[in-house]
Amino acid sequence: MTVRTLECPACPGAEGFAVNRACVACGADAVNVKGSEAWYIEQAINTVIGGGSLRGICRDWAEKGVLTPARRTRQEDGAFGEPAGRPWASGALRKLLLRPRNAGLVDHQGEIVGKAAWPRLSASPSGVTAKRFWRTRAGSQS
C-alpha cells in the first residue's frame, strides 16, 4: 500500500498520513481510495467477516476486471510472454487476505515480530480479525 491509496474524507490531506492512518493536516482517519488495491482488499476482508465466500469475491472481481498482479508466464516455446494478470482463485485470495502486513504487522518466517512502519489497510484491525474468523469457522466445522 502506498500513500496514494489513502485519502482524507475531511480535507485534501496534502501533508500525508501517520502510521495510525490519521491525516497529518486535520487528524481525521484516512480511508482507502475507492478502486485501489487496498480498497479491494479491505472490501474482501469485510465481505468474508460478514459471511461472504472467497469464490463469490473472486466472481465479483472477475466481473469487475480485477486481476492478480501481472506476471510473466512461460510459453510453449520456452520463452517468457508479456506480463499479464489473471483472474483471482480462492486459494490465492485467501493467502492475500491473511497476510499480516494487511493488519500493519511484520512477520518473519511465519512469526509476527512487531508493528510495521506502514499503516494497516483498514481503519479497524480486520486483517487480524479475518485470521481469527477463519480459525473460529474451521473449528466449528470439525
Image (cartoon, rainbow, N blue to C red):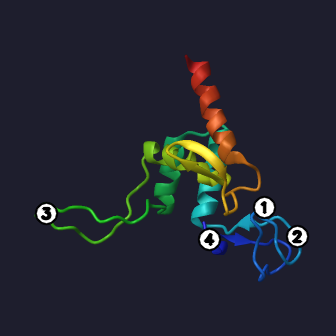
Q: Answer few, some or many: residues within 10 Å of disc 3's Cα (few below 14, many 20 plus, some between 14 and 19).
A: few
Q: Quadrant of the C terminus?
A: top right
Picture disc at residue 78: 3
Picture disc at residue 39: none
Query: Closer to the N terminus: mark 1 or mark 4?
Result: 4
Q: Answer few, some or many: residues within 10 Å of disc 2's Cα (few below 14, many 20 plus, some between 14 and 19).
A: some
Horizontal relation, residue 57 to residue 29: left or right: left
Residue 52 drawn at (x, y percent): 61, 40
**Residue tagged 1:** 20
- The type of residue carrying mark 2 is Gly
- Label 4 and label 3: CA atoms lie apart by 35 Å
Q: Quadrant of the N terminus?
A: bottom right
- Label 2 and label 3: CA atoms lie apart by 54 Å
Query: Closer to the N terminus: mark 4 or mark 3?
Result: 4
Residue 93 drawn at (x, y percent): 49, 48
**Residue tagged 4:** 2
Secondary-structure class at tag 2: loop
* Residue at the image position 77 percent from the left and 69 percent from the top: 18
- Label 1 and label 4: CA atoms lie apart by 14 Å
**Residue tagged 2:** 27
- The type of residue carrying mark 3 is Gly
* Residue at the image position 67 percent from the left and 43 percent from the top: 128
The answer to whether residue 33 is above or below residue 59 is: below
Residue contact between numbered discs 1 and 2, judged by CB atoms under 8 Å: no
Q: Answer few, some or many: residues within 10 Å of disc 1's Cα (few below 14, many 20 plus, some between 14 and 19).
A: some
